[in-house]
Image: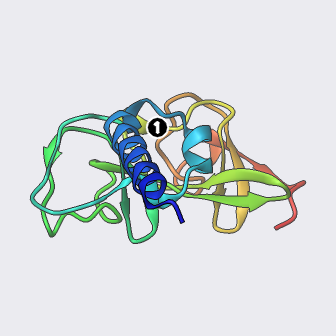
Amino acid sequence: MNWKRIRESKRVAESIKAAIVETSSHISDETMKLMPLSVFAAWKPDTFYETVGEVVVYEGVKYRITQSHTSQANWLPSEVPALYNAFATVDVGGDEIEEWQQTYAHNAYMKGKRVLYKGQVWESLTDNNSWSPDDYPAGWMLIDNYEL
């Protein structure tokens, strides 16, 4: 084995990972979906997250930071959508569709966006839609041609 080559490859891989972490706020959702969890930084409490859009991983899910803040142990990414936007998709009939999550003005669904909500695919009929299909049925259309 060529240990020098192995060490150099490891250094290159580590520098690539560092660059990805540093620039994760500029990675498109489509590209992020293809990247393994291991290239993103793990979420940690008591950490200042300055860059909106930065990607962190918590309990096996990728999250984008939605506003600058210092993380706290009781503000978990899975529980505070005002600070973290989960990036979770499911394969629905060959399409990757996000699972619906509560949104706010900064991350509301736009017209035409499809989501999985309670096992069904829904399409937003309006821009800036932050309500669930149950809470605002007029803002959503059920797409019934998907097989789950």
Query: Residue 12: x percent and y percent?
Result: 42, 44
**83 and 10: which one is in front?**
10
Which residue is pictured at 19% across the width and 38% down the height?
68
Query: Residue 64: x percent and y percent?
Result: 38, 45
Horizontal relation, residue 63 to residue 126: left or right: left
Query: Residue 100: x percent and y percent?
Result: 56, 55
Can you identify the residue that label 1 sits on?
108
Give residue 67's quadrant in the image. Answer: top left
Label 1, residues with CA under 10 Å away: few <14, some 14-19, many ≥20: some
Quadrant placement of the C terminus: bottom right
**SS of the residue under disc 1:** loop
- What amino acid type is highlighted by mark number 1? Ala
* Label total for image: 1
Residue 106 seen in the figure: yes
27 shown above or below 145:
above
Give residue 126's quadrant in the image. Answer: top right
Residue 105 seen in the figure: no
Q: How is the image coloured?
A: rainbow
Query: Residue 115: x percent and y percent?
Result: 65, 50
52 shown above or below 99:
above
Give residue 120's quadrant in the image. Answer: bottom right
Which residue is pictured at 87% across the width and 64% down the height?
147
Which residue is pictured at 44% across the width and 61% down the height?
3
Horizontal relation, residue 94 to residue 31: left or right: right
99 shown above or below 27:
below
**39 and 77: which one is in front?**
39
Which residue is pictured at 16% across the width and 69% down the height?
74
Quadrant placement of the N terminus: bottom right
